[in-house]
Image: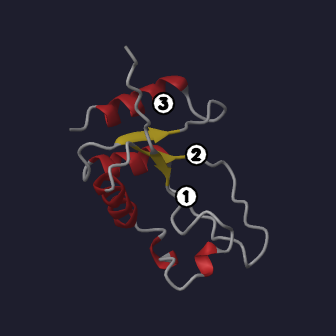
């Protein structure tokens, strides 16, 4: 008997694209990268598209080196996921947490809090 395998697909969301100049496109929504409702709407789109998970990476620096680079703006991934948990039902929520800068007890408590949203 062959075993059925399932492929899980997730999405890494950057507010205005993954290329350093994507924010310069006319449809990039760069004006909304500081608006949490924008990320909530992206998460709802991903959920409707049947993605299994949404991922946000924690960033400790602002890499923009020149005016043509993407604007350096990131919400804290855990705060972002807490907001997204309020408007989604089935999509998984994934974030990285820096073990260098985050207190382990606090990080565990924050993750548990997000996990308890229904």
Disc 2 residue crowd, few under 14, some 14–19, many 20+, Cα 10 Å: some
For this view, does 86 lie left or right of residue 10? left
Report the Cα–Cα distance between label 1 and label 2.
Answer: 8 Å
* Mark 1–mark 2 CB contact (< 8 Å): yes
Residue 12 spot, x, y in % from top left: 52, 51
Please report contact status of discs 1 and 3: CB closer than 8 Å, yes or no: no
Label 3 or label 2, whichever comes before in sequence order: 2
In front: label 3 or label 2: 2
Mark found first going from the N terminus, 1 or 2: 2
Residue annotated with mark 2: 58
Residue on which disc 3 sits: 107
- Mark 1 closeness class: few <14, some 14–19, many ≥20 residues within 10 Å: some
Q: CA distance from mark 3 to mark 2?
A: 12 Å
Residue at 44% over, 73% down: 32
Total numbered labels: 3
Res. 74 mark:
1
């Amino acid at each position: 008997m062959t075993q059925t395998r399932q492929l899980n697909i997730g999405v890494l969301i950057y507010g205005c694209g993954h290329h350093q100049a994507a924010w310069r496109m006319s449809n990039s929504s760069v004006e909304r990268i500081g608006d949490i409702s924008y990320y909530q709407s992206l998460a709802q789109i991903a959920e409707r598209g049947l993605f299994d998970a949404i991922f946000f990476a924690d960033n400790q620096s602002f890499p923009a080196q020149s005016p043509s680079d993407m604007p350096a703006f990131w919400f804290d991934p855990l705060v972002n996921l807490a907001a997204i948990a309020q408007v989604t039902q089935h999509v998984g929520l994934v974030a990285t947490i820096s073990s260098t800068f985050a207190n382990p007890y606090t990080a565990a408590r924050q993750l548990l809090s997000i996990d308890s949203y229904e």
